[in-house]
Image (tube, rainbow, N blue to C red):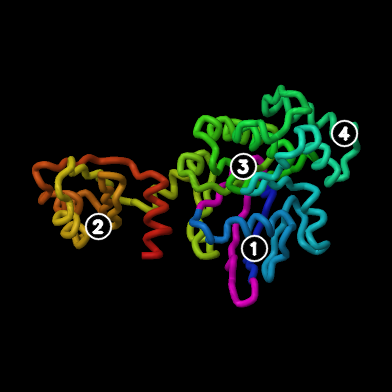
Amino acid sequence: MNPAPVLEVRDLSIKFGDFTAVDNISFSVNRGEIFGFLGANGAGKTTTIRMLCGLLEPTSGSALVGGLGFEDGGKGIKKIVGYMSQKFTLYNDLTVGENLDFAAGLRKLEPAYAKKRRKELFELIGFARPLSTMVASLPGGVKQELALAAAMLHDPEIVFLDEPTSGVAPSSRARFWSLIRRITGLGKTVIVTTHYMDEAEQCGRIALMRTGRLIALDSPAELKRTAFPGPMAEIDFKGGDAAAFISGLAKAAGLLELSPHGMRWHAAFRDKAAMDAALSALPRSASAGLIQPSLEDVFIRLIEGAER
């Protein structure tokens, strides 16, 4: 038996004048799920999240967030969601304690409850520095973890994270995603946007957005399977001139996608026969081997390929 959705979106759109930022999207998110949004800048990811946090009112369509709609202007929704924006949301010129006191004041939390939650969240993120520590003195990854704690002070059901690890070192990104998994282990639902494909791989399901529209939604494994039903080869020209061969390969029958990856190329085909025929003219200095498609390949095919 599947858990009841904690978030249900139906035909949701928002316009700013003549510009449609989000165009008639529908999806649902289950309780305890890590749900990701993936797309280029301007695809509508942040605008969608801001609507679902009650910060923007949709032009049309509907959404139930924890069973609540927009009838009260999103006031009810704001009480049950936590939001961490893609820009750092704490103040560098305040201490850790002052930042969290300010966040608690905005939520109108009782001081005793705020203190209790602060202790719980410090244990969750492993923060052991004094409250008097200036935020400006902290490493970027620790700042992001504190921003997450501030977003969760009121114990929200659903946590929205908009590019939470942008500009953070890889080791800090890995630690932050470990925190995300711990949060969902506590029964919370996390909805996250990211540009990092390795992070998107950790989501239970991913919604791919392009120009305000939802173009695909599934698990990482299913997205790869449906985007690339046939074999994929990685071609290494070992420093040789690839231009002539690639020009011909681009016209090969049965080719689904051809894209550069550093000094190598990924070529996806309809079936093995099409691949064998296309690669039969491979120069002697080059080599090719079968590989599994990555989310980056999916992104190139479904997002960038559509734009091409």
Q: According to the image, label 2 marks what residue?
A: 255
Mark 1 and mark 2: span between their CA atoms? 36 Å
Q: Residues within 10 Å of mark 1 (few under 14, many from 20)?
A: some
Q: Residues within 10 Å of mark 2 (few under 14, many from 20)?
A: some
Mark 2: secondary structure: strand
Q: Residues within 10 Å of mark 4 (few under 14, many from 20)?
A: few
Residue 187 visible in the snapshot = no
Mark 4: secondary structure: helix
Q: Which quadrant holds the N terminus? A: top right
Amino acid residing under circle 4: Tyr
- Quadrant hosting residue 114: top right
> Which one is nearer the viewer's eye here, 153 or 240?
240
Amino acid residing under circle 1: Arg
Residue 242: percent from left, percent from top: 17, 51
Q: According to the image, label 4 marks what residue?
A: 113
Query: Which of disc 4 and disc 3 is earlier in sequence?
Result: 3
Amino acid residing under circle 2: Leu
Query: Does the CB distance between marks 3 and 4 fall below 8 Å?
Result: no
> Which one is nearer the viewer's eye here, 202 or 217?
202
217 relative to 139 in the view: left or right: left
Q: According to the image, label 3 marks what residue?
A: 33
Is residue 147 part of the magenta span, yes or no? no
Instruction: Point out the stretch of residues depicted in magenta.
Output: 16-38
Q: According to the image, label 1 marks what residue?
A: 10
